[in-house]
Amino acid sequence: MPRIDLESIEQTNRTGYPAPFDAAVAGRWYRRLAPATGLNAIGASHVVLKPGAWSSQRHWHASEDELLVMLTGEAVLVEDEGRTLLRPGDICIWPAGVENGHHLINESDQECSFICVDGGKRTHGSYPDIDMMWDENQVYRHKDGTPY
Amino acid sequence: MPRIDLESIEQTNRTGYPAPFDAAVAGRWYRRLAPATGLNAIGASHVVLKPGAWSSQRHWHASEDELLVMLTGEAVLVEDEGRTLLRPGDICIWPAGVENGHHLINESDQECSFICVDGGKRTHGSYPDIDMMWDENQVYRHKDGTPY
């Protein structure tokens, strides 16, 4: 298979986040690369963040590894320890099970883009800043277990 | 975990290839990111190719997915169908089990660099252009099964 033709893969800003947590990712436009290319052991997304958009609510995964490569523009990585400015070529890695929430915010006035790759079993995870988690069936719940 | 500090991770041009297949990768300088960062479900390498260097002998994997993101410079991707010039931001994906050998050659007079991510079970694979394969124990063999 040759180089991926991104234009041939659907781009969407869909989200399953319940309101009001969906608003922050309205400017996140992504392409899921795995179903389009036959990947099974890893997942991959190409993501464009419009100015102001978040990559996700700040989150961690119990059993999935994540790796991100910045492609264009700038974004701020937010984690427990604070903020890190990311530029093209920067690489971020979040091993499964480390309960340190992370996400990117495009605070610039230009689009930015990145690739995110994940692997491992899809189980649960959580959002440290808000009353939300997801369970092993990928269902969003309040932290007391009540579904959204 | 914040952005990866590549300089803190050992860079090497080691290879297990037997002669004469090792010569083509002498100018391949890589950093293994997974052991340094705690990744388990996926593997990842940051690779620099000096002018003339190959990323590997042309190969395919029976059961590992691979994804590559070009970071800097240019390289030529060689596959069964022919040659594709890769530039920064280009993404290549090779799903497990597709017996289409692939590798990159730096035909330019500048260094190039890329990230390669893999996931899935490590079993066997083969090199279509030479009398070499590897088995489920990652041992290099002639195609008649004789070990190197």
Image (cartoon, coloured by chain):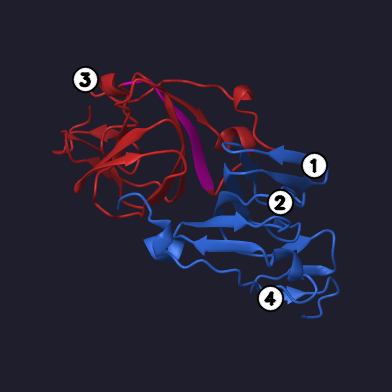
Chain colours: A red, B blue
Q: What stretch is highlighted in magenta?
A: A42-51
Tell me the kind of residue under disc 2: Asn
Q: Does A74 appear above or below B54?
A: above
Which chain letter goes with mark 3?
A
- Crowd band around label 2 with a 10 angstrom C-alpha radius: few (<14), some (14–19), many (20+): many
Name the quadrant of the C terminus of chain A: top left
Q: Which mark is residue B83?
A: 1
Tag 2 near tag 3, CB within 8 Å:
no
Q: Mark 4 points at which residue?
A: B139
Nearer to us of marks 4 and 1 is 1
**Cα–Cα span, label 2 and label 3:** 49 Å
Q: Which residue lies furthest to the left in this view?
A: A144
Helix, strand or loop status at disc 2:
loop
Q: How far apart are marks 2 and 4 (CA)?
A: 27 Å
Q: Which mark is residue B106?
A: 2
Q: What residue type is labelled 3?
A: Pro
